[in-house]
Amino acid sequence: MTAGDPRFFARTGPHRLSALAEAARAERVVGGDDRLFVGVGPLQAATPNEVGFLDNRRYAAQLPGTQAGAVILHPDLVDRLPPGCAGLVTPEPYAAWARVAALFHPPRPASPGIHPTAVVAATARVDPTAEIGPHGVIGERAAIGPGCRIGPGAVIGEGVVIGRDTRIGAHASVSHALLGDRVYVYPGARIGQEGFGFAATPAGFVTVPQLGRVILEDDVEVGANTTIDRGSAQDTVIGAGSRLDNLVQIGHNVRLGRCCVVVAQAGISGSTVLEDFVEIAAQAGLTGHLRIGRKARVGAQAGVMSDVPAGRDVLGSPAMPVREFFRNVAVLKRLAARRPAGLPGSVTQDEGAG
């Protein structure tokens, strides 16, 4: 089955090969005339009037047999194109594929208007080009910018400001926050709730008021069911172009730089700073008050308890440089191999003795 089921995805086109090359920002076009294409598809399933792509070289063996009319690919793979198949040649095939797919399947624009079941406060400002979906709630003094889409059941709290062409998914909630342009908050996300702050006393816990905000800069995406706490006395900031996956937890006062990536089920504790282009893999946990340097990468399930220098890759818990981590793993394997299981002093027998 090809990509873009029409029951769910609107389609434009057909588009000529020259238009696809322009959208892909291809360095050159190899073979083929300027014919029309109707859509995109995976390399192994695309038809002669569709465009495929090849980014992962593990699938290069599929290229000679593809039926696609054109393929987006790296210059090193041009000589493997089958006869009659055009090549859109670029050093960044995946980015080019994203642009071409978006040409055929652009995001649905806002349908201006406020649904009859929505509740909009009298002091709220909703741009006439914005869309407020069924049962949406817009609080007092909130401002919704041009071209925004507020999904069904979404709640926008008092005083929240949302820039142009921003999308808020179904049942998401946004409070104590300022959002830039082209932000996408996926369904179920929670933005701006109180951070986890309390003082311990002999009589119990005293909640510390959380008086900061959440700032989502331009082009940020926040995944489904992700939570971003507002700051305590300063702001929680997600830098421009950053991407948060589903089920991510961002604590109060955390600051992300530009184009950071945080993958599913990762958690970042309060007041930690990520500089630009940091990547946090799935299920990693970062303690509070850390600084993660520019372009550092934290591996899956890592436990980060100290600062990470710029450009450093870390793994393990506690997190350590990648080479050190694998050296430790190799040493443990050698130690385990010295005594066969079941002999006196073996790991298995010692564990059973308890």
Image: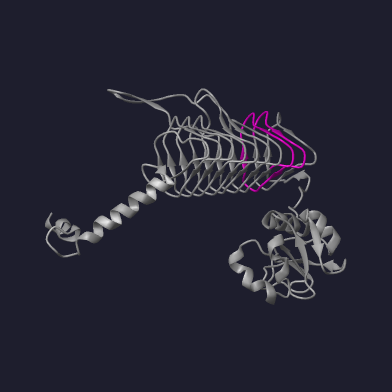
Residue 148 lies in magenta, yes or no?
yes
Give residue 242's quadrant in the image.
top right
The location of residue 14, given as percent across then percent down, is 84, 64
**What secondary structure is the magenta-colored segment mainly?**
loop
Is residue 340 visible from the viewing direction of this image?
Answer: yes
Residue positioned 67% across, 41% down in the render? 219
Give residue 167's quadrant in the image.
top right
Left or right of 321? Residue 136 is right
Left or right of 207? Residue 60 is right
User: Magenta segment range?
Assistant: 139-166
Q: Nearer the viewer, residue 321 or 147?
A: 321
Q: Quadrant of the C terminus?
A: bottom left
Q: Quadrant of the N terminus?
A: bottom right
The location of residue 3, given as percent across then percent down, is 69, 66
Q: Is residue 339 above or below residue 233?
A: below
Residue 49 lies in magenta, yes or no?
no
The location of residue 36, given as percent across then percent down, is 85, 67
The location of residue 223, given as percent across then percent down, is 57, 47
Residue positioned 73% across, 59% down in the render? 101
Give residue 162's quadrant in the image.
top right
Residue positioned 61% across, 34% down in the render? 157
